[in-house]
């Protein structure tokens, strides 16, 4: 079955081809987790930019808010090429206030 999914902010559209409900569920969840972030967790602006930085051979995936410069960093699963947003605080608890969006002071 084919599913057409459009993100909440209407900017991205994906066609998901799946062979079962479970497969479709999994693919939609992977897509939503990365691409359905509509607003900055700091200032709520919706002008977000996808960024990949390469540092010493490692790629870092981030969303950056063009308004306030805050970033949401994505971790990479060890296999499968999937990403997940890092929404935990240093103490391991879910970042309820900013949903993982941080402002760094060192300018990168
Ligand atoms: Zn912002």
Image: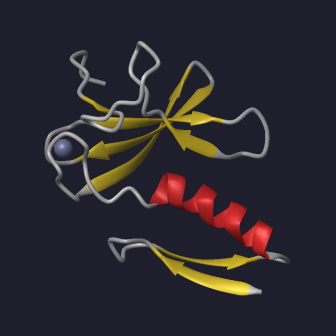
Colour style of the rendered protein structure: secondary structure
Of 70 and 25, which appears nearest the observer? 25
Left or right? Give the position of 63 relative to 19: left
Please tell me in which quadrant of the rendered image residue 24 appears: bottom right
- In the picture, the quarter occupied by the N terminus is bottom right
Residue 26's spot in the image, x, y percent?
A: 71, 61
Residue 45's spot in the image, x, y percent?
A: 17, 54
Q: Residue furthest right?
A: 19
Q: Is residue 108 above or below residue 16?
A: above
Q: Is residue 102 above or below residue 35?
A: above
Specify the quarter for ligand 1. top left
Left or right? Give the position of 18 relative to 101: right
Left or right? Give the position of 46 relative to 36: left
Q: Is residue 22 above or below residue 35?
A: below
Residue 103's spot in the image, x, y percent?
A: 23, 27
The image shows a total of numbered marks equal to 0
- In the picture, the quarter occupied by the C terminus is top left
Of 82 and 106, which appears nearest the observer? 82
Question: What residue sits 63% from the left and 35% below the top?
Answer: 76
Question: What residue sits 47% from the left and 18% below the top?
Answer: 92
Q: Is residue 46 above or below residue 64?
A: below
Question: What residue sits 43% from the left and 71% below the top?
Answer: 7
Left or right? Give the position of 33 relative to 10: right
Question: What residue sits 24% from the left and 22% below the top?
Answer: 107
Residue 97's spot in the image, x, y percent?
A: 24, 34
């Amino acid at each position: 079955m084919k599913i057409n999914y459009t993100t909440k902010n209407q900017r991205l559209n994906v066609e998901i081809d799946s062979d079962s409900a479970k497969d479709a569920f999994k693919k939609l969840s992977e897509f939503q987790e990365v691409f359905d972030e509509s607003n900055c967790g700091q200032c709520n602006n919706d002008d977000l930019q996808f960024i990949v930085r390469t540092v010493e051979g490692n790629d870092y995936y981030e969303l950056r808010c063009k308004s306030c410069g805050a970033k949401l960093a994505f971790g990479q699963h060890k296999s499968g090429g999937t990403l997940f947003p890092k929404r935990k605080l240093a103490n391991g608890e879910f970042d309820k206030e900013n949903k993982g969006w941080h402002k760094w002071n060192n300018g990168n």
